[in-house]
Amino acid sequence: MGDTRLISNPQRMSGDEINPAAVAQAVEDVQGDDRWMSQHTRFVQECKDAEPEVLFIGDSMVQLMQQYEIWRELFSPLHALNFGIGGDTTCNVLWRLQNGELDNIRPKVTVVWVGTNNHEHSAEQVAGGILAIAQLLTSRLPKTKVVVLGLLARGDGPNPLREKNAAVNGFLRSWLPRLGQAQFLDVGAGFVHSDGTISTRDMFDFLHLTAAGYRAIAKPLSDLLLQILDETPEEKRASLV
Amino acid sequence: MALSTPRLLVRFLGGRNLLYGGAPFPSEQTPGDSKTRNEETDKVMSSGDSNPAATPTPCVDIQGDGRWMSLHNHFVSNSKDKEPDVLFVGDSLVQLLHQFEVWRELFSPLHALNFGVGGDETQHVLWRLSNGELAHISPKVVVLWVGTHNHSHTAEQICGGIMAIVQLIKDKLPKAYTLVLGVLPRGKMPNPLRERNAQVNKLVKDAVSSLPHASLLNVDPGFVHSDGSISHQDLYDFLHLTPQGYQAVCQPLHAHLKGLLEKQAEN
């Protein structure tokens, strides 16, 4: 499905064109208060002080999760760090990971959730960008497991972005398993009702999750994380053998 | 952008709502068109066409899922069977407030409705309120919190936009009181947007000082520390409030609101 050459080299589309969604790019400060860079700098500093077992990286879907009670309940106990920034595309996440947000930390699991903001890119390009992120993680952190969350449906009723996000998920489903340490987790089941609508009870603006929406996705995710953490041998235990 | 959707098309048009009504050319506006004018009003540019921040403008769907219009329609239909005493309207700072426990704790008991939309600028809120969001309700107090996303406008224009909303609310809900919340500081360290927001607050405070039906409430509990920094514990991305940040803002706001509602009840 899609260009299989992307699996080995997601930076290139068919015909050797560069995949723009896999090009690392910082966010330019156009508003005037430099908030993106301030957030990145804070994350780099956190890497110096923290020893996370789980790293979450992505866009506002990741960032907002930390503001709800569910984070303290299910993910803080796993020693999780949250490096989400609202508005980020795959390009921005790639830049951040290449510029300090992986320094000095050795999480056992990295959760990646990004792609819904890649408005300039096709579904295949977005999936390629996410794949590039997964590859970067496994090459920088050879012992880490990568969990890529599927993009959620969005909008009040059926619309092209839902189709696009579903297509991204389709590519990821077939590409990620070939990466060995990476897996795809679809947490989107149940958000779209039989009449095609999404409720503001789950997504308050038909994009961002409410507390109830996060509760629904957090359970399967935390179950998977616990399973992975359980299976991962402690480093000191391994060295005793 | 996830929370602050860029309004590129409107900006390209220089803020003129060529597509959505309003006089497209300044020459078409006759003197005396705008509301009661005095020096103050002229200074803050609340007359529609010369101030894009005060010209009702819907959001164009550039992303492809029509969420802005969906939310607007949702608010309009949602208001048909509700009788709120308080209406909160504005941008993401209003919208996000609705998601946290503090809303249920402090504002649900006041019978409040929340019509916040992330990324909204003054002209978007003006459009929403002009196109149905006030049609089916008669709140006693409208809490207005908007202005921080007006990136292509000056402090004067933003003030004009806020005052246009205040006037619209007066026209549609003659008995309502409008409580304008001061725009918060933003960014980790001092920057031009903090100055702009502070100037907006000053201009609005002056403009409402003569109005019996509106006032400005400064809700900044002191987010800026002595070294000029803002903490991510209060504004998680140096713009949006954490639950802790909301508690600090909302406790005094709640007390003030209760006072206002009691005064309205006496009248």
Image (spheres, grey):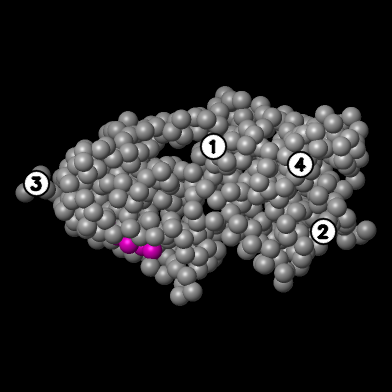
Dot 3: few (<14), some (14–19), or many (≥20) neighbours within 10 Å?
few
- The C terminus of chain B: image quadrant: bottom right
Q: Name the secondary structure under disc 4.
A: loop
Q: Quadrant of residue B261?
A: bottom right
Please tell me which residue is depicted at 64% across the width and 53% down the height of the picture.
B116
Q: Are marks 1 and 2 on the same chain?
A: yes
The segment highlighted magenta reads A184-188
Q: Are marks 4 and 1 on the same chain?
A: yes
Dot 1: few (<14), some (14–19), or many (≥20) neighbours within 10 Å?
many
Dot 2: few (<14), some (14–19), or many (≥20) neighbours within 10 Å?
some
Mark 4 / mark 1, whichever is N-terminal: 4
Q: CA distance from mark 1 to mark 2?
A: 32 Å
Instruction: Give the chain of mark 3.
Output: A
Mark 2 / mark 4, whichever is N-terminal: 4
Q: Name the secondary structure under disc 2.
A: loop
Q: Which residue is mark 4?
A: B23
Q: Which mark is residue B238?
A: 1
Q: Which residue is mark 3?
A: A240
Instruction: Give the chain of mark 4.
Output: B
Nearest-to-viewer mark from 3 and 2: 2
Q: Looking at the picture, which amino acid does disc 4 mark?
A: Ala
Q: Looking at the picture, which amino acid does disc 3 mark?
A: Leu
Q: Which residue is mark 2?
A: B140
Nearest-to-viewer mark from 4 and 1: 4
